[in-house]
Image (spheres, grey):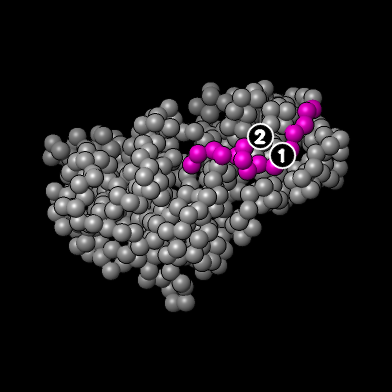
Amino acid sequence: MTPAFKTLASPLAFAAALSLSGAGALWAQDGAPLPDYVIAEFGAPPVIPDGPLPETVQRAVKMAFVDSVTQSTWGRDQRTALAEVAASGDPRLAWIVSDLMRFSNGPDLTAALAEAATGLLGKEIPTRNAWGVVTDHLIAWDIPAPPDYLEAKRAIFTNLIPGWDRIFVEGDIDWRMVSWGGVLIDDRVYDTTDERCNCIPAADNPEVISAVEATWLDDDDIVFGIEIDGEARAYPRQIMEVREMVNDTLGGRDLGIPYCTLCGAAQAYFTDELPAGIERPVLRTSGLLIRSNKVMYDVNSYSVFDTFLGTAVTGPLAEKGVALEQASVVTSEWGAWKEAHPDTTVLAEELALGRDFDFRNGRDADGPIFPVGDVDPRLPVHEDVIGIVTASGTPVAFQRSAAMVALQRGAKISVENVRLVLDAGGIKAVDADGSDLGSHQAFWFAWSQFHPDTVLWQG
């Protein structure tokens, strides 16, 4: 997702002078000690109070963050309110400061919010990339959300960007981690994806061609390969970097296929064979992120899904406990995929809309461009891993480069019921009987964030 907030943000602008100091503590909100590497990188967190906000602070929050956005105004009252928020010394309120900061398009506003965050967190916040710095610290320190946080956050997000009213609702989702990816929601109904949109445009029922016809692809082009019941299809990265979401049918099964360019993960979820009375989810990109991972939702019910886990977390589908089964996605090169699957189909070049991005080696070459907080230091942030959850519920990550070398020399790789096998130039996980376990490739920072207790296979 590419930031575009200067054309979408509210025209708020102001200047203020605020400063406070904070004290240190070394515990996350769940009472567990923060890892040493967090303290080494981010320093000691501030002391965090418990309980409700004082009424005066509640009124200040409403004036500074809710009323200013809903009324599109900023003046003396709002500046005074922001000063009262900063003077409270409550680090929890820095989450709301961060939310408004995300939409700031003026240096005066950004500077004032950065100074308020400095007071709340007890750490000097630079105006350059202030939102990223503040959010990284909040995540790494695991600062709790303030009381009634969703109400304030919803007011900011839904008043500044249209289309999210049905997204920002209560559910099994950590709203602290939700940020704007810089694009609008894709809310087009099913099978209307040929229509233009000011969004990341999903593709429904995409046009496919044979391997012989796919002369536009070079053998070393990256593809995401899926095989269902003997039918194979390749989804070229060039197309998926433009579309980021495909709703397709393969091998007689309906699929939703999200690709998160930011975390290097293409996944495939079965969107059929759900309990009676549940309409097929049609997956779309919401324009929101959670720790640099796209937030997808069902355009029929406006239920939000955890993109990495396939579980509905808000809306009617969450109430019904919908969790989508995952199929394996093999990340490979086109030459290797078509050699292993000569009858494969592949998405037609026209679906790339004339664009040819390479985010991995361009935009993201220096690491995540959105805040992710702390990252497990066992591997580099953009190291490719093959991720899978074992039968006992243990998440396991296999470093792709090491696993590839081991498998190519004939070594066996297994953890509990999981076995890694070479497949069409890539790697996938299978059960002891060879059945598909629904694995996929992702960057280490993404897998380890969504599975913080993951085991890292040591080759």
| Closer to us: 352 or 233 | 352
Question: Is the residue marked by circle 1 packed among few (<14), some (14-19), or many (20+) residues within 10 Å?
Answer: some
Kindly identify which residue carries mark 1: 11
The stretch in magenta equals 1-16
Position above or below: 298 against 365: below
Residue 105's spot in the image, x, y percent?
Answer: 66, 34
Question: Is the residue marked by circle 2 packed among few (<14), some (14-19), or many (20+) residues within 10 Å?
Answer: some
Q: Which mark is residue 287?
A: none
Can residue 297 be seen by looking at this rendering? yes
Kindly identify which residue carries mark 2: 105
Q: Considering only order in the chain, which callout, 1 or 2, is on the residue closer to the N terminus?
A: 1
| Closer to us: 74 or 113 | 74
Amino acid type, mark 2: Asn
Residue 94's spot in the image, x, y percent?
Answer: 69, 36
| Closer to us: 26 or 71 | 71
Secondary structure mostly seen in magenta is: loop
* Whole-number angstrom distance, CA of label 2 to CA of label 1: 7 Å
Amino acid type, mark 1: Pro
